[in-house]
Image (cartoon, grey):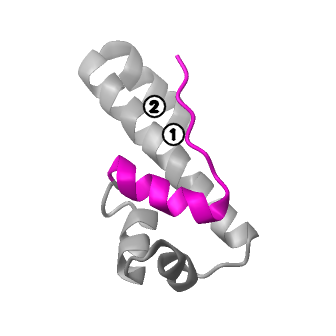
């Protein structure tokens, strides 16, 4: 295996439990990555975003550093001032 993606795909192909875990982590990383990207694009600091959301800056920092996974309410609260929408597809 040459890359991280090769390894992830290998694990996904041989272990259904770990496949689901990896896919969940990838989904969360994609959402949080979009939040970070949009916050930076708008020129907002974590502190400024937190203020707009009515939460402590440390909460935004923990979410952005993947130390905590936000619940749906918190995620929507963060996405709104960034002009982001959560879409669910099948």
Circles 1 and 2 in contact, beta carbons < 8 Å: yes
77 over 18 or under it: above or below? below
At which x and y percent is residue 6?
52, 29
The secondary structure type at the circle numbered 2 is helix
Residue identifier under label 2: 7
Give residue 56's quadrant in the image. bottom left
Q: Name which residue lies at 33% across and 14% down.
A: 14
On whether residue 88 falls in the magenta region, the answer is yes
71 over 66 or under it: above or below? above
Q: Which mark is residue 71?
A: none
Q: Which mark is residue 4?
A: 1
Residue 58 as seen in the image, left or right of residue 86: left
Q: Name which residue lies at 36% across and 80% down.
A: 58
Neighbor class of circle 1 (other Cα within 10 Å; few <14, some 14-19, many 20+) is few
At which x and y percent is residue 40?
68, 71
Q: Name which residue lies at 47% across and 24% down.
A: 9
The secondary structure type at the circle numbered 1 is helix
Residue 77 as seen in the image, left or right of residue 82: left
Asked whether residue 1 appears in the rendered view, the answer is: no
Give residue 22's quadrant in the image. top left
At which x and y percent is residue 45?
60, 82
Q: Which residues are magenta?
A: 71-90
């Amino acid at each position: 295996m040459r890359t991280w993606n090769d390894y992830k795909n290998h694990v996904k192909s041989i272990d259904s439990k770990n496949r689901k875990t990896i896919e969940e982590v990838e989904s969360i990383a994609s959402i949080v990555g979009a939040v970070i990207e949009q916050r930076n694009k708008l020129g907002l600091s974590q502190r400024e975003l937190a203020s707009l959301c009515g939460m402590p800056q440390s909460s935004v920092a923990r979410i952005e550093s993947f130390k905590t996974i936000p619940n749906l309410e918190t995620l929507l609260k963060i996405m709104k001032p960034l002009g982001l929408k959560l879409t669910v597809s099948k």
